[in-house]
Amino acid sequence: MFDNVHIEPTDESLGEATAAARAEEFDAFVAVGGGSTIDTAKAANLYSCYPADLLDYVNLPIGKGLPVPGPLKPLIAIPTTAGTGSETTGVAIFDFVKMHAKTGIAHRRLKPTLGLIDPENTRTQPPAVAASAGLDVLSHAIESYTALPFHQRPRPERPILRPAYQGSNPISDVWSLESLRLVSIYLERAVRDPSDDEARGSMMLAAAFAGIGFGNAGVHLPHGMSYPVSGLVRGYRAPGYAVDHALVPHGVSVILNAPAVYRFVSSACPERHLRAAEILGAKVNGARLDDAGKILADRIVQLIRDLHLPNGLRALGYETADIPRLVEGTLPQHRVTKLSPRPAGPEDLARLFEESMLAW
Ligand SMILES: [Fe+2]
């Protein structure tokens, strides 16, 4: 048993887990926990089966982006939060401390062999964790649905070099939209009342459905921008999280960037933004396509307020002076930023961070 998983894993904590995985000859891995635990197990499985320098399998341009050489040991993932969807994806995310930025390893061979999705396992999830994780689900669903379409991405030289995140596609759309429908009905109920079994169970399914959606289509700017927001954290303590260090929960760092992003990218696929807003309960009758991003953004801000999340990046301790570093931490996140339906250069990103300072 390895119980030293770091909440929001780091290069160092993955190394520790890998060392534990190599200490004996194990047959299989069982990951019981949230995304941090499942991602740690994926990495420990990979680096114990195919020992290599950490950066070898890490995404370009931060790492070498080498494909996983062969099959890994069986991994059974048992999620205890309704957020990550990591039980369905071939992605492991960690904080590369030296760069103050999150990055990841993405390959279909990292996908768990089996996911056990049991609502009983989220019964004691604190409301703040349910809110943050649930907004991560919401963002997975919308980002994968609005990501650059698969046929507009560059074609890889060989199929094995095809990225795990391939752009929005008709099959991922089905999973993402159904996930969003569940989130719109059950998220607030699941946060408000942990004894609401129907809501909690539905949010676990929503997390897994969104995982299947974004695990194939990918996410884009809200996630790309979230990595430096988490990585550069100074003093912020997240209510409801039992940790003894500064931490911006993943879902919080994602969702606070989302409204500005959707206002910016919606011109690339306004119908999709309007559809997402409609599923979330916004009034879209007679709405102009030009307003699609704003309508979706306003609905998300309302959810952020209703779920008592911080009012923008400023509430996490960031100021305008931090923006250049936030932009610098976003630019290398090609795995996700290249999936933005509208390209975003450094000046665009700076403006998006500035608009994300205050949510309302
Ligand atoms: Fe996420």
Image (cartoon, rainbow, N blue to C red):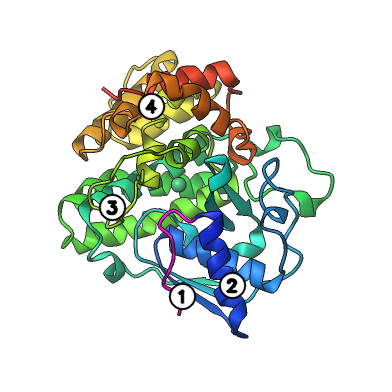
- Residue 318 is labelled as none
**What is the secondary structure assignment of the residue under circle 4?**
helix
The Cα–Cα distance between marks 3 and 1, rounded to whole angstroms, is 23 Å
Up the image or down, 331 lies above or below 126; here it is above
Horizontal and vertical percent for residue 347?
Answer: 55, 16
Residue placed furthest toward the right: 157
Residue matched to label 1: 2
* Main SS class of the magenta portion in the image: loop
The answer to which of 74 and 243 lies nearer the viewer is 243
At a point 36% along the width and 31% down the height, the residue shown is 277
Q: Nearer the viewer, mark 2 or mark 1?
A: 2
The Cα–Cα distance between marks 1 and 4, rounded to whole angstroms, is 38 Å
Residue type at mark 4 is Pro
Which stretch is magenta?
1-9
Residue 288 belongs to magenta span: no
Q: Nearer the viewer, mark 3 or mark 2?
A: 2
Residue 4 belongs to magenta span: yes
- Residue 19 is labelled as 2
Cβ–Cβ under 8 Å for marks 3 and 4: no
Horizontal and vertical percent for residue 344?
Answer: 58, 22
Q: Can residue 55 be seen here?
A: yes
Residue type at mark 2 is Ala
The Cα–Cα distance between marks 3 and 4, rounded to whole angstroms, is 21 Å
Looking at marks 4 and 2 on the same chain, the residue that comes earlier in the sequence is marked by: 2
Residue matched to label 4: 259
Horizontal and vertical percent for residue 43?
Answer: 59, 63
Q: Nearer the viewer, mark 1 or mark 4?
A: 1
